[in-house]
Amino acid sequence: MTRECPKNAFVPQNHYSLGCIWYPTFLFWLLVTNLTTYPTNLINLIKRTQSTKITKPTVEISSIQILNVVVASRITHLLLVLFRASERWKEPSSKKRSQCCHADYYYNREEDDAMRNAREEEKKKEKGSSNARSNLESRFNQTLRIVQELLLGSSFPGKVLMTHKSETSSELTSLVHHQNFGRSYSENDIGLSKKEELQSSGNMTRSAEFQKLKISMTNSESKLSDALRSASGARAVDSARITKFTKALSGSSVILEKLRELAWNGVPPDMRPSIWRLLLGYASPNPDRRERLLTRKRLEYADCVSQYCDIPETERSDDEINMLRQIAVDCPRTVPDVTFFQQEQVQKSLERILYTWAIRHPASGYVQGINDLVTPFLMVFLSEHLDGRMGSCSVSDLSPQKISNVEADCYWCLSQLLDGMQDHYTFAQPGIQRLIFKLKELVHRIDERVSRHMEEEGLEFLQFAFRWFNCLLVREIPFHLVTRLWDTYLAEGDALPDFLVYICASLLLTWSDELLKLDFQEMVMFLQHLPTQNWTHHELEMVLSRAYMWHVMFNNSPSHLAS
């Protein structure tokens, strides 16, 4: 007879429990051991009865025999119970399977529940293993994409990679589409195709993947290099970056720190004039006061020009006459390879800006090299009025008022820039000498072989690095890259002199292998005429990225630079 098990009864977690296995086994073993002796005892008893002459035979029944009979009956009952239980387990009815075989002995769990739990555990294990495999594949894909970017030259270690990781792919994509190639070879294309191959052929080894990567990049290298060379700062004209700049400029007040962070990686050409004014503190962050302040500054410059420049020679002192003559000599030499600066009106504007600045800064006066620092400002602020057609337009087509406004903007921006490095142009130029010493220590720490070779050949850093710091590298790179370089300069703000050391170190060690093969005279000629004529934004970004990486490593650890 069976009845349902009470709700609070103990239910074993496995129906193969101690009560169902070990207890019947023990009873079966006991039955077998006793039954083997039972026939022998019965035969002996019969023989003893026949040998004795007793009218009424007496049968001696031992305690073991009584136990055998009890055990046999008990085992018979137990076997019957187990048989009924097994029959209930086979029944499909969940109600019957949930009944107890005996109220005092067992409660059987449902077999399908156990099987379901086992299947769920197997599914969890499979899901966990699949998640682990997917995570491993995703990490490998990410590493693969990073290697692709590095080999393609589209991302670099440093600030470009750390702050704007997602911009490189969009730049290359838009750049290559703009060039109307038959097939778009962008970073995203290569990364997605590799990801699909990896998912479809999971048994491929990593070496095979990298081999395929090299083959694919070899096929697209020439087209990508042409695209990069023909681009004038793809990062700066990316639509996403333009949106960020527009948002930063459209607030009630411009947050300069956010603007500096965006400008570090390049400024869109159309926005460069207004952003440079803001970064230098010449224009007000508040748009309501911006135009009023610019108007007042431009009028102040016009008054200075009428006071210092529009006067006869007899009213000038001898020092002023000599300084004006030196400026007149240096202006035609300024950026001689760019025809735009050979226009007479441009040289007149440059002369007025430099002379006015020299008169108002008597501690330094005019120093050769400052004329190169005005050229990026002239190019940028004139582009507002020439619609970017710098090569074909003449400045003489502009009205005198516009020319005066451009000169005023250049003058005030130059003043703001040089206020942070005034000792670079005072007597003996101690600021530049200090930077040259830092550059020597930094190069020794980064590449000791180059530093030792230059020392053995007797080459002093002063012989080539003085012009680098004096002209802020304007003469060392193609002029179409200067404005991009100055985006980073102005974004650094007051920290520019320190960061300039790392830029110069990065520029110098770009040719570390070549320098090791040169003697003293060859190194002097090489470093004074660096082979940067064919440079594009790609090479410049590499220099800036290395400079940022070394700046992070060494700037806050001066003891690392101690010789």
Image (tube, rainbow, N blue to C red):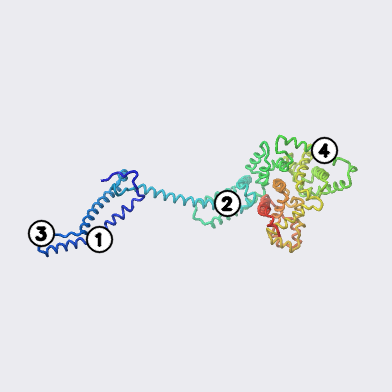
Query: What amino acid type should be assigned to the residue bearing mark 4?
Result: Asp
Circle 2 residue: 145
For label 4, the residue is 303
- Outermost left residue: 55
Mark 2 nearby-residue class (10 Å; few <14, some 14–19, many ≥20): many
SS under mark 4: helix
Check whether the beta carbons of the residues at disc 4 and disc 2 lie within 8 A of each other.
no
Mark nearest the camera among 3 and 1 is 3
Q: Secondary structure at mark 1?
A: helix
Residue 429 visible: yes
The amino acid on which the numbered mark 3 sits, given as a three-letter code, is: Lys
CA distance separating discs 1 and 4: 127 Å
Q: Quadrant of residue 3?
A: top left
Q: Which residue matches tag 3?
A: 56
* Tag in front: 4 or 3: 3
Q: Which mark is residue 33?
A: 1
Q: Position of residue 73 (x, y in %)?
A: 22, 53
Q: Earlier in the sequence, mark 3 or mark 2?
A: 3
* Residue found 86% across the figure and 46% down from its top: 320
Mark in the foreground, 1 or 2: 1
Q: Position of residue 410 (x, y in %)?
A: 77, 42
| Secondary structure type for disc 2 | helix
